[in-house]
Amino acid sequence: MRVFIASPGYSIAEKKLNLEIDSVIKGAGFSTFLLERDCPEYGLLVAELRKREYAPDQARDIASSVIGFLIYRQCYIECDVTVLNLNGRVPDEGSIIAAGISFASGKHLVTYCDDSRRLFYGIHHPLITVLTLSEMVNRIEEIPPALRRCFESDQTSRTRIGKMAADISVQYHFSDQHQPSLSEFLDLIERRFPRQE
């Protein structure tokens, strides 16, 4: 199984954390795609294209497109699962895009976060929360077991919640003729989510 590691990699600390995540995943027998190791660096690629006499705008466009498609191919085609690092007050936009590609293509997603900073009262934005409904861990050592669980069963409690939430979102639709009330929305939730005792 090949794992796409979606994680910010700009600072020395972020790169060190990425290598630690990569090492733990590989140590558990998985292969990985780690952007800063497996993909040409944008600035370096632009500089090399400029040395080959590409115009500045063309070099930037080519580098951006090639790197973008390489990431997309790895995330959408080559990798079976994505590990999303949500550390930071605001998640890395590239990581969120990669996780969104995985989510939209029906691939498994394991979310790692040991950082309590959040924009919305201690929780992530609802669109990010949708991405995290499969497996969420807060210690690096928990990532490999979570990866294995992804393929043992699609029915983890978070996955079931995600499927029920998706069902509600299909039923709760807006149109020019009818905008469901909060009461109707809550009724849908109560039908799909039994209260825990």
Image (cartoon, grey):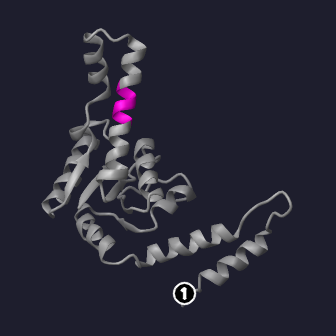
Q: Which residue is mark 1?
A: 196
Residue 140, compared with residue 75, is above or below; it is: below
Residue 55, compared with residue 178, is above or below; it is: above
SS for callout 1: loop
Q: Give the quarter of the figure containing the N terminus.
A: bottom left
Q: Which residue occupies 48% across, 77% down?
A: 160
Q: Give the quarter of the figure containing the C terminus.
A: bottom right
* Residue 6, magenta (yes or no): no
Residue 93: x and y, percent? Answer: 45, 42
Q: Which residue occupies 76% across, 61% down?
A: 174
Q: Is residue 167 left or right of residue 6?
A: right
Residue 86, compared with residue 150, is above or below; it is: above
> Seen from this angle, which residue lies furthest bottom?
197
Residue 97: x and y, percent? Answer: 45, 46
The magenta stretch is 63-68
Q: Nearer the viewer, residue 119 or 188?
A: 188
Amino acid type, mark 1: Gln
> Seen from this angle, which residue lies furthest front?
77
